[in-house]
Structures are given as C-alpha cells and as structure tokens.
Amino acid sequence: MKGIVFTEFLEMVEKEFGLEIADHIIENSKLESQGAYTAIGTYSHDEMLQLISNLSTKTETDIPILLKAFGRYLFDTFLSSYPGFFERTTSAFDFLESIENHIHVEVRKLYSDAELPSFTTQRVEDIGFEMIYSSERKMADFAEGLIERTMEYYKTPYEMKKVNINEEGSMVKFTIMKK
Amino acid sequence: MDPKILLRKLEREIAARKAAESILEKKALELFQTNEALKGLNETLEQEIELRTEKMISFDKKYRDLVETIDEVIYHADLKGNFIFMNQNGPARFGFKYEEMIEAHYSKFVHPDDIENTRNFYRNMMLEDKDNSYLQFRIISKDGQIRWIGQSVKAVREEGQIIKFAAVARDITERKKLIDALNEAKELAESAQKAEKQFLANMSHEIRTPLNAIIGMSHLLSDTKLDIDQSEYVDVLLSSSTILHSLISDVLDISKIDAGHIEIQEKEFDLISLLKILEKTFAVKLENKAIEMKLDIEEGIDTMLIGDELLLSQVFFNLLGNAEKFTEHGNILLKVGIKEHTSAYIKINFEVKDTGIGIPKNKIDDIFKKFKQVSEDKKFKYGGTGLGLPITKKIINLMGGDLAVESIEGLGSVFHFELNFRNTGKPIVSKVAFDINSDSFKQPTFPILVVEDNPLNQKYIGRLLTKWAFNYEFANHGKEAIHKCNEKEYALIFMDIQMPIMDGIEAAKNIRNTNNLNQNVPIIALTASSLLSIKDETKQIGMNDFLSKPFTPLELQIALSKYFATQAHQDKAINEIDAKFRFHKELDQSYIEENYGNDLVYTLDMFETFLDSFEKDNAKLKQGISDKDIKICARYCHKIKPMFTIVGLDKITTYFESLESLLKANEWEGFISTYNTVEVAIIDAYNLITKEVSRLRKHLSAGTVD
C-alpha cells in the first residue's frame, strides 16, 4: 500500500482526533515501519488494518464509518494537492470514471508496483451510474466515502445503493442515480 | 500534551524523511542507470542506422546500376503523361538525351498513328482502375527510325488513388519482325495446305467428271452395233479410261490416308451378303477370262456384325482386283474362316488366293511399299500405280488387322488378314439371293429423280435407266430437285454432289429436314470425289448410299438392286407366296396382290416403311393434339391417311379422312371425340401390321410358314 495513504490517514487522525490518538494507535500497533511513513514509500496493508482497528477501538467508532470518513477526507486532499486530477472533469460521473481511466494510470506511471483497486464504471443514460469496486483490500466503505464527497463537490443530488457482489466484500456494486 | 508524544512524532518524521531520502537516492540511481542504458541504446541505434544507411546506399547503387544497365527504358509518368523519372541510359537507346526526355510529354516520341492508341491505353487504365497493363506501339527514334515498343505499365497508388504510372518499355522491333515473319510463314504454310486440299478436291472433281463421261459413253458405245475394229477401239478406250480412273482414285486415297483424313465408321452390317455381292460382281467381271471366282465361307456367321462395311468392301475390291490383274487362268478364291466366335465378337480370317504369276521371293517385301511394283516390265504389262496394295494394307491397319502375303512365283499368291468384329447377336435377315444377271427390275410406282448438272452424265444415266425400263426425271441442280420433291413423289433420288446454284449436300439436307413428299425417299449420292472421303458427309446428312463417278453400268445396277427387286427373284417369290404365305384376313388381299404383285420382299419393305412412317407421324399428331395445334393435326392426319390403304387397311384410311375433314371445318371438339373413338382401332391396326412384318421376316428367312 502506498505511503501517501498512511500519511494522509494519520494526518486525518491527527486533525480529527488529535496527536495523542494518532500516537496511541501507532504505539499500540506492531508496525514494521515503526510508524515512520513517507508518501513515496510502500508499506504492508496489514499496518493499515492494525491502525484502523486500533482507531476503532480507541474512538469506539465502527471501522466502516472510519473508512468512509477517510474516503471523504482523501477526496479533499486530492483536490488541494492534485488539482490536475480535476482539470479535465466537469461532472461527478466524469470524475468517478477518471479514477480508473486517468488517476490510476498516472499512479502506475510513478509506481509500477502499486496495487490499486479497480473501478469499472458504466453510465445508464445520463442520470444513472454503476461502479463496481474490486479489491482484495475490501475497503468498499472507503470508496463509498470518496463517491459521496465527489457527488457533493459537484453539487449533484443523488441516491446511492450499495450491494455486495460477493460475501467477503472484495467486489461491491454502487448504483448512483441523479435526483 | 505529553512532550513524549511530540518527540515520538518528530522521531517518526525524521525516520520517514530519511527513508524518503533513501528511496529518492535509490530512485536517482535507477534513473542514472536507466539514462546510461539509454545512452548505450542510442549508440547502438546510431550504429545500426549507419549500417543500414550504408546498406541502403549500396542497395540503391545496385538498383541504380540495374536500372541503368538494363536493356529497357524505365520511367515514371505523371497523370498528364509527362516523364517524371527515367533511367539515364534509357533515352540513349533511341538516340535521345536524358534532358530531352525527362519532363517531356510522351506524345512527342510516339508515332503519330499510335498516339490515339497510347492515349486510350492510359485513359482506360484510369477509367477501369487497372493495376497492370501492357501495350505495344511505335516510337520514332532521334534518327527517324520507327521502333516497336512493348511496355508493361503499373499504376502507382496513394491511398487507393492512381498518382502516377511506372513503366518498363522494351525495344521489341526485332522480335516483332520475327513474329511477323513467323506469322507470314504460318499463313503461307496454311494457305499452301489449304490449296493442296483444294487442289486434291478439285482434281478429283475436274478429272473424274470428264472421265465419267468417257467411260459412260464408251459403255454405251459398246452396246451399239460396232464392227470388229470399232469394238476393239472401244475396248481399249474403256480399259484405258478405267485404268486412268483407278490411278487417280489410288493417288487421292493414298494422300488422304497419309494425311490421316480417313476415319473408321463402324456400324451394323451383314458380312455374308457383302461377300456374296462381291462374288457376283467379280464373277461377272471374270466372265470373259478363263478364271473361276469362288467364295468359301465357313458356316457359323449368322449374326449382324459391327464394322466399316465400306472400307472392308474397298479392301476386297483391291485384293480381288489385284488377283484378277495378275491371273490368266485358274481361279480366284475368297476364303472366309472363323478364328474365334463369342457372343461379344467374331474374329475372322480372310484369304484371297489366286493362281496367278506369283511374286518372286526377293520382291515380296516391296509389294506393300508405295509406288513399288515387282518389276518395271510388269508395270508396263499390267499397269497400275503401285498404290493398290499399300492402300489396302493401310486400310486393314486402320481396322486393326494386318495384311500378309505368301507366294510362290509361277503358282500364285495368298493375301490374308484377320479382323475382329463386334457381334450384335442380331440374326441376319436374309435377303433373297441377288441376281445380277437379271436385266429387269420390278418397276416402282413412282419415277426416279436424277439430280445432275452435267448433260453427258444425264444422258448416260438416262440411257441405262431406260434400258432397265425405269421412269425417271432430271433436275439440273439442288434447287430444282427441292422444287420437284415438293411437287411429287419419287421412288429414289440420284443426287450429284457438286452442282451449280445448290449442291447435292445442301439439297439432300433440305429434303431430309423439311416436310415434303420425299422426306424418307432413298437418296444415292453421285460423287466425283474420292470414294473414301465423301462417305462421312453423305451418311451424316442422311443419304442412304453413294456411287463414285465414273461408275459402270454394273455398279449402277448393283446400287439400284438394293432398292428395287429384280424380276428374277420376284418370280421366285411369287411361287413361294402362292405356295405358303397368307396375309391376315383383316388385310385387303386383292389390294396387296394388285400393288405388290405377290413380291414378299417388296411387301415387307412397304410394311416396314409404313411402320416407320406411321410411328413418326403419329407421334407428331399426338404432340399436335396435346398442343391443341389444329394445323399440325390436319397436316399429320393428311399424311397418315393414305398409309393404311397401302398396307391393305382401307377402313382406317376412312377414319383419317373424317378426322381430316373435321379439322378442316375447324371442329376441334368433334375431332377430339372422334379421335378418341377410333384410336383403339388405329392402334389395333398398327399392332396387326407389326405382327405381319415379323411373320413376313420369319417366312422370308426360314422359307417356312408359321
């Protein structure tokens, strides 16, 4: 998992819950990296699971809610740190499509070893949108947060349905309808 | 806040910074290495490009050398027809400088008469969107010479559109000259060959026509009252003209055999009756010599065989004629033996044995060679071309056999050969023995039509027909013959082949293929052409027989005897009929007696003709009925009407009279209902005649009654 995910996660934790909580979850996890994350590094996915799990325990908040919040947070990070991602997109659906077709392509150019989730998308007329999240990391909740924030950013009222395609949740279908 | 937490965060950040630096260092190293690798690759690429450029230069040089040394003009022309590329040496071949031709328009160099052609050539390539094409045309070289060019042109395309033409043009003047010369030689050779054929045909006609008159008139002359001297002169005249005739025939035949113009025409024939006719013919010829003609046929040939009767009879004529020529006294024996006999084929051995002068041992190999005779003095004595035996041998070879000879000088010769004939298994319908000595024919109801343009030949045939008491008429050419055939019925037609206005072939075709009174009448071709060559054509168009001019009275008599019963056998037949044969009681006995004079052969012939004609015409009538074609029905009712009277069933004729009159009155419904009523009777009548015919055949072949 790319370092930027960890640095952004910890930053969110510091902002939302404070330095103590951030330190606490690092100190209480058995991290190979000792919690010294750099955005350009690559770290085990297991470290993220430990950090989230500890955060959930510490804050008494469910993991899905935390992941969703992280998704929303990351969107805003992208917006301020990578304005280039948004130059060519004018709508929520455009942006959601560009994750797979543009952002991931760019990420792979920099980090050929990056393990990225896949987002296959399909428009239904002009009002509907289907997006299938597929990743062994099973972080569909994170994707949901990202989608929610995208819709809000583009000021698009919508309804969303989330259906697990398989039991373990490595494939999840989001159906988004404009209102 | 616990400063420890801040310290830990700081430591982590420092560690992260270090890790990041280390990663970046690593990345920088990777980048450096990649850069070095790229440099290397670049160098390799540059080297490769250099190598390729060198290769291309050498390749280009090779191409240029090829283009410049090749003996052709290679050029590109734009769509307007201007040369936009040309090999340097190309123009030099026609005395032009490169500068004179490049960028110039092609029409400046093309022969004025070929400019239009050349323009159309390029235009067609564009219009028809062709990729390749070839053109021959003339150009005028710098020194004013006309040179022939053959050029292959390829359209050069860009995105499917023709943008220019690439061409290779070659000077083909010499080749063209050679081809022209060859063509000229070929035409010359062909016309020479044609002329030769034409010459043979003409010679055949031109020489035989007057010869026919000479021989014919000599025969007639010999029948007049002559004193001894005159008679001797006429004999010399006859024998000399006959020799001349056979000489010409032989020369023509051998040239045709040599040219491969003779083909075997196999059909069903009766070997026994062929042999018997030959025996009789030669017996008559030998009457004035102290030679006896003998025929010895082994028992067992009782079926019709398949073979070329005409060629076979020519073989016997030649061999028997040869034997006759070299025999003074004794006998000539034609011996026929069966070697193998199966249901599929019969292998027959033929021998012609004479008691003549024989052949010396040292000359025996020469006799089958062209123009060779035993000795010069014998040639003088016996005459002939020396072609008879080579022709005979070749004909036998064509039929699948081989002619051999055994001879003892002074005692005689035996010529023998074996031939295989396919066996039809059909029994021979034996004819009443043919009597050549009878001068009288049973006269037919209708006259004979002689179609002949030559007045001398007319006179000759006329005299002979008069002698045998035939009625006859003349037509001077084919057109007149057709006219006459439409007017009235004839018993037989003699048809000359070469005639002005319309020839005999044309006329016979017309008579056979159009509806007229004589559509099925026997036609005998009279031809001055060689015996072997004309037969195909006359047979093909449905002529029954032919006589090669000049013919002897005997030959004419033999020809006629195939179609008209002679008096002698008629008498014989009368006796037999009265004794044994009774026609079915349904048939009008008195009518048959009155019309066929109790001649059973003639009656059988008429009945068979009836069956034949009725079958054909009735089929047409039925077709007419199903087509509801009133005209056709009327025509065939009219045609069939008299047929039944002829076979003694007058009652059926009256049916057809009524049918015809109904049709003439346009009473189609009445015609159909009447026809349906009488049809059974008609079929019964037809079946009755069929039975009578088979009874007659049986009676005639077995000589018994059923």
Image: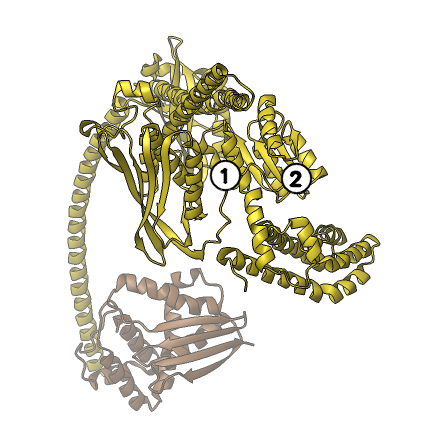
The answer to whether any part of residue A107 appears in the image is yes
What is the C-alpha distance between the residues marked 2 and 1? 24 Å
Subunit that carries the residue with mark 2 = B
Residue to which mark 1 is pinned? B436
Q: Is residue B362 left or right of residue B583?
A: left
Residue shown at 26%/69% (left/top)?
A114
Near-viewer residue (B308 or A118):
B308
The chain coloured brown carries which letter? Answer: A
Image quadrant holding the C terminus of chain B, namely: bottom right
Type of the residue with mark 1: Ile
CB under 8 Å between callouts 2 and 1? no
Residue toward you, A20 or A163: A163
Amino acid residing under circle 2: Tyr
- Name the colour assigned to chain B in the rendering: yellow
Q: Which mark is residue B490?
A: 2
Q: Residue at x 16, y 51 (%)?
A: B37
SS state under label 1: loop
**Which quadrant would residue B565 be assigned to in this image?**
top right
Q: Chain of mark 1?
A: B
